[in-house]
Structure formats: C-alpha cells, structure tokens
C-alpha cells in the first residue's frame, strides 16, 4: 500500500477526528480544551536543545518522525503481561494497550464506597462525572509542547477518584503496554487521579512495551491531593528498548497533603520524566524518589519542578542514577519558593554512579527563592564505584564482579527500600540484579 | 608458609617498599613495628592484593604458590586475611549479608558446599560472642556509624568467622581501651594454631603483652632494619626507633 497522503500530519488527522461534530466522547467542555491545546502545540512546536529546559535532551528523533495513533501490533498474552503485574491483591488493575483501555486484560474488584476507578474515556461520557471539574486544570502546557500535544489528543487513560475520608489500602495498578508494530506508533495515555480531603491511596503506573521497534509514548498524569490526603504514586518505566517516552506527572497539593512519587526508569531509549508539584496549601509535604539504571546508549532526563507557593511545606527529592556503557542521565531540580512561602524546607539530592568511562551524567539544581525565612539545600555527586570499598569486599573473598554488584546495589538500596509495596520492591531488586549480571563483561563472569 | 623475597612496591609512583625479606612459618606470630610512614600498611596491603599498590619487584609465595599472581579475592579464598588499619564504611550492605557471601565464596573455592542461613547464623552468633560484639551490629551497614572500637572488633569478628591461615592485623590495637584490647588479643590467640600464622603490625609494645610474638621485625624506610625475638619490642620501647635507624646502615650492608 502506497501512502500518498503522508504529508498530512498524523496528529492533525487524529485531532480533527476527535473534535469533529457529533463525535462520541467530545463534549463541549472537552472539545474546547482539546482545541486550545492543539493551537498551543502548533505555536510551540517540538522543543529543541536551544530551550533551556531541553538543553541536554534532543527530541529530534520524535519530532522528525510521523508516529501514528491507533495502529497496533501483536496483543500480548496474559502471561506476557504477568511479569509486569503486582503479586499483591490490587483494588483494581487497569490495562491499556497502545493507550486504550482493554477490558479483557483488566480487573476491577469490588471497590469500597467512595472509590471510582475506570477508564477516562468512560468517565468522559458518564453523566455527572466529576472529570470535567478536574481535567486539564493543573498540567499546564503554556511552555510544555508535549503536554499540549497530549491534551490536544487526550482520549483515554485512567480515572481514579477517592472521596473524602476514604482510605484505600490496596494499590491500584495501571499497566500501559505498547505493542510496537513495525509502523511507528504513538500512544498518549492521560490519567487523572483525585484524592479528596483526608483520603488515602496508592497508584502504580507501569509502562512497558515490545522490544525491537520504535514507538512513542506521551503520557500525562494529573494528581490532585486535597487537604490532608495521603497519596503514594509509583511510575515504573520498563519500556521496550527502542521506545521514546515523554511523561509528565503534575501534582497539585493543598493543605497538609502528603504525596510521595517514585520514578524508576529502566527501559526506553529516550526518556524524559517531567515531575512537578505545586504546594498550594500550608503544611503540605512531597517526596520525589527516583532511580534510573541505564545501559547501551539510553538517555534519561528527569526534570523536577517543586513550586512552594504557600508557607510551611516540606519537599524532598532524592534521585539516583546508575549509568553504564555510553548512557546518559540528566537531572534538573528546579525549586521555586514564592514570596509567601516562608518556613519552606526543601532538600534535593542527586547522585550518579558511573560504571563506564563513556557514561555521562548531568546534574543541575535551580533554586529560585523569593522568601527570606527558608531552608533549601541541594547536593549532587557524580562518581565511580569506590575502590577502597571494592578492595575491602575483595579482601574477604568476593570476586570483583560480586563486589561491584554489591556496591551498586547498595548505592540504590535506599531508593529501593522506600518502595512500600513488597512485590514491587522485589520486582525492582530483580531488575537491578538482572541488569547488573547482564552488564558483566565476558571473561569476568564467575 | 609465607616467603617474601626482595619485595619492592610503589604507591602513586613513589617507591615505598625497598626490598623486604620475610619468612613466616606455620604456627608463628610475627610482629612488625616501625615509625609512621615506614611502609607497614603498604606491606600489609601488598600481601592482601590491593591493586592501588604496584609491585615492582620481588616474590611472595604462600605454601609454594605465587601470591602476587592472584587477585585479592583469590588470596582471601586461599586463606589470607587483612584486618584493616582503617576499616571501610559501606552504606547499604549489612555485615551479615556480605560475610555470608565471603564465607560461601571461600567454601566454593575449596569445593565445599555453601552454608545455608541457619548454619551461618550459628557461626555468626558464636563468633560475635567471642569478640563481645553486639550481634545487632551485624544487621547494620558495614562499619557505618560504628565507633573506632566497634570497627576493630568487627575486623576480628570477621577474621574469626573466616578462619584464615595467614592473618595480617594492621594496627588493630590502636586507639583501643584495655578491655577492647584484651578482646582483640583473645580473638587472635584463639586463632593461633600450628597450621596458622599471624602477622601483627603495631606501634605499641602493649599489644605484645597479650599477643606474644615469636619474632619482631622493625621496618624503617621500606626495609626491615632489624629482626629479633620478643625482647626486641621491649628494647624498642626503651630506646625508640632512632636507635634502629642508626643501626640500619650496618644491617643493610651486611645483607
Ligand atoms: N594510597 C596511598 N596513596 C599515596 N601515598 C600513600 C598511600 N598509602 C601510603 N602512602 C605513602 O606511603 C608511605 C608509607 O605509608 P604506610 O601507610 O605504608 O606507612 P605505615 O608504616 O603504615 O604508617 P602508619 O604507622 O602511620 O600507619 C607514606 O609516605 C604514605 O604517605
Ligand atoms: Mg599503617
């Protein structure tokens, strides 16, 4: 089949299809959101390395390709997906294949009163759904082309809503699988998580896909933690080896809310995680915990923005990178402390362990402080495995590889131990160890 | 057991060991003394296989095998143990986890079966008691936040678990109070047997009241300037190292 109309932009085509007259799932409120976002996306265009925020990350491989939406490869079997699932009893497991909710793969156990978990597509067409009052209110896209694109084309994803005072102990697992057909495919999941006053919940997002062919994931999650809510969020990136993954987690927190978000990156060839929160009420607390373990020519950019808008909020950022071969890890940690945000306590740490001479790490703190009574610290290290520690372990009988692996594992251990879901923690430990053993050069094996 | 011949070694391009000769037989305890910076730790590290030290000449044999040809871990599996002058802190790795890995590496090297968790725990409990080490410390990261005394006892504890044939103690006594010193010495004396040898590097004759050496060597400027019996330690205590240094010219020419 000859594609003679390739010149028509795939995103244009899809946007027009979504926003046409009489299209299902296109209520007026949403139509105008999509149209405004698309207009902004077209103004912005894809960023280049001339943008300060994209200085270290070149997205030309995404910009120059025509990724198509809605093309699919081989749908995975339940067995294939099981390696990505949690062993714990989950409150709900939603599976998305190429960005679309898959009923057959998903399981929603009976949820307690006050909890809604469904696909965003369903929520959009459900009468009286609270979606309209929250969607696209916090993931702003004035300067974020990818978020604008995601908003312009938003269609499906997860909707999680926990009402006031409701405590959900069991985690909610969201699994995004890309089938990676030979033609370049894009998926644009859009998630909305709302934790009302004094509620509690845990959400795990796993991104995974087939190896071998290139695909593009552009995902946006908005997480709203209202007064006194406690939310744990995990994002596990196990994308295929040729995936380009651009993700944005935007948190909005009000008074006394407590959000912990983990970003664990193992997969993908080009990955960007934009992680942001606005601490918009006194006494709020956020912890961003990150780990990236890279090999080959993987490029991973974690871009954090913590906006202290109100007084007496605490923020903690701990990101660790383990970089092998010619991989590159980028960390940018921007902290804004607004004029009102007295008694802010912000701490940021980024540590990188280079396992090869060709690996490279960049670490850039950006503190913009407009209040005077604040405590803000940041620290960054880039180094190799400590040779004194290596000798200590070897002098007791551990071979070079075992000693190195133990030290690398130890480096990551605090990030891993902060994962509070047992099976997820052991999944990450396994990923770490597998990666370490894989990295073992021939001849050094024991 | 250990035969060191004309050993030369460098650190960062600077020659530190300038021809060491030393013979240690099974069952013996040798003490190496000497002024600061004379090369005692360098010798200990070279024997244990620290790659930061470059051997530029000479030979080291243990039980007829060329030690210099082996990496540090193989030497450890062959029975060499170094108690570090400055034990390394390793966040994120517990002593018990790492010691089990070490013990099993050795057992594997000798064709023995690996220990299971229960057997290992039994050994660990018994040996921890021996050096009066709070067993809870073993579930903490290696040496992290340990006091000086705890670090030294942890070294002796590891030695007791690993049961080396050649133990090298680098100033394990420095900075210890008398009770801790007795514990350390007790650990070493317990290890003493006709099949094993110990090299005790120390600054202070005090330790030698508790670990009585068969031989004492004085290391000055990268060479063994004087050797003798345990009475040499006392003589050094009275006369100071300068006394040996003055004599070293003669020793060197007569060698
Ligand atoms: N890793 C190293 N890097 C650079 N120089 C070193 C290193 N280790 C030892 N040296 C140097 O080698 C010389 C001998 O040091 P060594 O530690 O062997 O002495 P020592 O006899 O053990 O001293 P002390 O009694 O203080 O423990 C010193 O001049 C020291 O500065
Ligand atoms: Mg020394």
Image (cartoon, grey):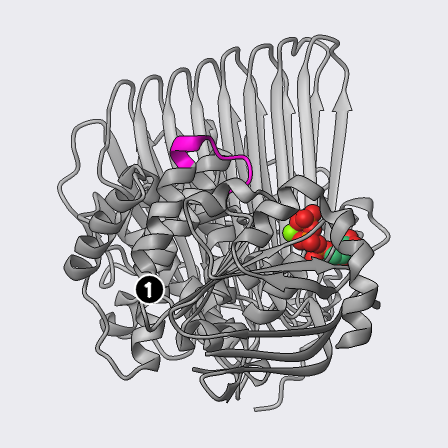
Note whether B204 is above or below A184 in the view shown.
above
Residue at image point 55% right, 40% down:
B174
- In the image, A30 versus B240, the foreground residue is B240
- The chain carrying label 1 is B
Is residue B174 found inside the magenta-colored segment of the image? yes
Across and down, in percent, residue A362 comes to 74, 52
- Residue A369 is drawn in which quadrant? top right
Q: Is residue B32 visible?
A: yes
Across and down, in percent, residue B122 comes to 17, 54
Query: Residue beneath label 1, please?
Result: B163
Secondary structure mainly formed by the magenta segment: loop
- In the image, A358 versus A13, the foreground residue is A358
Is residue B106 found inside the magenta-colored segment of the image? no
Q: Quadrant of ligand 1?
A: bottom right
Label 1 environment density (alpha carbons within 10 Å; few <14, some 14–19, many ≥20): some
Q: In the figure, is residue A99 to the left or right of A19? A: left
Query: Quadrant of the image for the C terminus of chain B?
Result: bottom right
Residue at image point 30% right, 37% down:
B134
Q: Is residue A238 visible?
A: no
Looking at the rendered structure, the secondary structure element under dot 1 is: loop
Residue range (magenta): B173-180
Across and down, in percent, residue A124 comes to 38, 41
Residue at image point 46% right, 30% down:
B177
Across and down, in percent, residue B39 comes to 71, 59
Q: Residue furthest bottom?
A: A1
């Amino acid at each position: 089949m000859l594609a003679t109309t390739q010149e028509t932009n795939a995103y244009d085509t899809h946007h027009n299809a979504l926003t046409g007259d009489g299209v299902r799932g296109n209520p007026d409120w949403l139509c105008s959101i999509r149209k405004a976002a698309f207009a902004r996306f077209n103004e912005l265009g894809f960023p280049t390395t001339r943008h300060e925020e994209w200085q270290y990350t070149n997205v030309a491989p995404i910009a120059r390709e025509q990724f198509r939406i809605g093309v699919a490869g081989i749908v995975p079997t339940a067995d294939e997906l099981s390696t990505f699932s949690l062993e714990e009893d989950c409150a709900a497991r939603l599976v998305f294949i190429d960005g679309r909710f898959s009923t057959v793969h998903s399981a929603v156990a009976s949820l307690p009163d006050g909890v809604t978990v469904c696909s965003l597509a369903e929520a959009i067409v459900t009468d009286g759904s609270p979606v309209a009052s929250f969607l696209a209110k916090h993931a702003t896209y004035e300067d974020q082309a990818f978020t604008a694109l995601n908003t312009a084309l938003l269609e499906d994803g997860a909707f999680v809503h926990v009402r006031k005072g409701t405590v959900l102990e069991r985690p909610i697992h969201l699994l995004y699988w890309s089938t990676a057909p030979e033609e370049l495919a894009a998926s644009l999941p859009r998630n909305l998580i709302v934790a009302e006053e004094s509620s509690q919940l845990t959400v795990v997002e796993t991104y995974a896909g087939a190896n071998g062919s290139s695909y593009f994931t552009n995902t946006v999650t908005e997480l709203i933690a209202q007064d006194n809510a406690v939310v744990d969020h995990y994002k596990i990136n196990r994308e295929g080896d040729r995936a380009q993954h651009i993700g944005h987690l935007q948190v909005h927190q009000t008074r006394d809310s407590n959000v912990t978000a983990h970003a664990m990156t193992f997969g993908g060839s080009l990955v960007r995680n934009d992680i942001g929160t606005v601490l918009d009420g006194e006494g709020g607390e956020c912890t961003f915990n990150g780990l990236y373990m890279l090999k080959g020519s993987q490029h991973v950019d974690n871009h954090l923005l913590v906006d202290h808008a109100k007084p007496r909020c605490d923020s903690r950022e701990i990101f660790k990178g383990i970089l092998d071969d010619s991989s590159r890890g980028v960390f940018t940690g921007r902290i804004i402390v607004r004029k009102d945000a007295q008694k802010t306590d912000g701490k940021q740490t980024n540590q990188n362990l280079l396992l090869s001479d060709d690996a490279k790490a960049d670490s850039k703190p950006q503190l913009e402080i407009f209040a005077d009574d604040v405590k803000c610290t940041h620290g960054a290290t880039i180094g190799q495995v400590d040779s004194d520690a290596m000798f200590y372990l070897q002098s007791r009988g551990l071979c070079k590889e075992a000693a190195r692996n133990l030290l690398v594992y130890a480096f990551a251990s605090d990030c891993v131990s902060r994962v509070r879901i047992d099976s997820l923690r052991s999944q990450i430990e396994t990923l770490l160890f597998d990666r370490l053993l894989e990295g073992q050069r021939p001849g050094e094996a024991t | 057991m250990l035969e060191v011949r004309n050993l030369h070694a460098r650190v960062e391009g600077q020659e530190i060991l300038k021809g060491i000769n030393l013979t240690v037989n099974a069952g013996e305890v040798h003490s190496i003394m000497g002024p600061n910076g004379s090369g005692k730790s360098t010798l200990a590290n070279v024997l244990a296989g620290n790659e930061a030290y470059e051997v530029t000449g000479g030979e080291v044999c243990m039980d007829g095998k060329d030690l210099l040809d082996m990496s540090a871990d193989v030497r450890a599996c062959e029975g060499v143990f170094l108690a570090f002058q400055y034990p390394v802190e390793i966040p994120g790795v517990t002593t018990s986890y790492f010691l089990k890995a070490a013990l099993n590496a050795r057992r594997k090297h000798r064709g023995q079966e690996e220990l299971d968790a229960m057997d290992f725990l039994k050994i660990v409990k018994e040996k921890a008691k021996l050096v009066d080490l709070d067993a809870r410390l073993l579930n903490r990261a290696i040496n992290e936040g340990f006091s000086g005394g705890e670090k030294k006892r942890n070294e002796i504890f590891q030695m007791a678990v690993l049961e080396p044939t050649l133990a090298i103690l680098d100033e394990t006594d420095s900075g210890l109070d008398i009770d801790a010193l007795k514990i350390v010495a007790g650990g070493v004396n317990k290890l003493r047997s006709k099949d094993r040898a110990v090299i005790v590097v120390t600054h202070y004759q005090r330790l030698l009241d508790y670990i009585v050496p068969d031989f004492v060597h004085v290391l000055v400027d990268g060479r063994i300037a004087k050797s003798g019996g345990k009475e040499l330690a006392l003589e050094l205590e009275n006369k100071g190292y300068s006394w040996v240094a003055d004599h070293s010219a003669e020793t060197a020419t007569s060698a």
